[in-house]
């Protein structure tokens, strides 16, 4: 019987809400806002919300691009002058 095994270099890191918030240096509330707004990818296993590290890095890149396109001032939609982290 053949099994699918991944080596540590092939396996992608998966973070829970606390880990993703710490990685991005934002609050849990900000994570949930970004998920609800469709800007941050996540998935659930049973009742646990999880994040692929690659999706967090894509989110950071999108925030950087939006900041650059706005001339250095990136404001999250739906806020009155609040900046995204």
Image: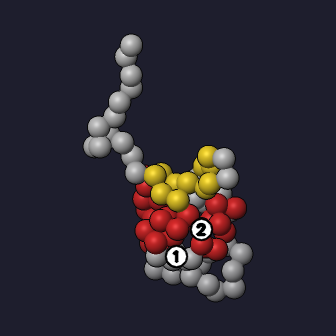
For label 2, the residue is 31
In the image, residue 74 lies at what x, y percent? 54, 77
- For the residues labelled 2 and 1, the Cα–Cα distance comes to 7 Å
* Viewer-side residue, 25 vs 85: 25
Question: Dot 1 lies on which element?
Answer: loop
Name the colour scheme.
secondary structure
Mark 2 and mark 1 lie on one chain; the one further toward the N terminus is 1
Image position, residue 67 (x, y; %): 48, 73
Q: Which x, y percent locates residue 69?
A: 49, 70
In the image, what residue occupies the spot 52% across and 59% down? Answer: 16
| Residue 43 left/right relative to 22 | right
Q: Is residue 69 visible?
A: no
Local packing at callout 2 (Cα closer than 10 Å; few below 14, some 14-19, many 20+) is many
Does residue 85 show up? yes
The residue identified by callout 1 is: 26
Which disc number belongs to residue 80?
A: none
Left or right: 79 with respect to 19? Answer: right
Q: Secondary structure at mark 2?
A: helix
**Residue ID at (52%, 54%):** 51
């Amino acid at each position: 019987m053949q099994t699918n095994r991944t080596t540590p270099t092939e396996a992608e890191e998966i973070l829970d809400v606390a880990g993703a918030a710490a990685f991005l240096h934002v609050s849990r509330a900000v994570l949930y806002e970004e998920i609800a707004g469709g800007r941050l990818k996540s998935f659930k296993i049973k009742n646990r919300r999880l994040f692929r590290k690659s999706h967090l890095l894509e989110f950071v890149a999108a925030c950087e691009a939006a900041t650059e396109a706005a001339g250095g001032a990136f404001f999250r939609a739906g806020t009155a002058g609040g900046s995204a982290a």
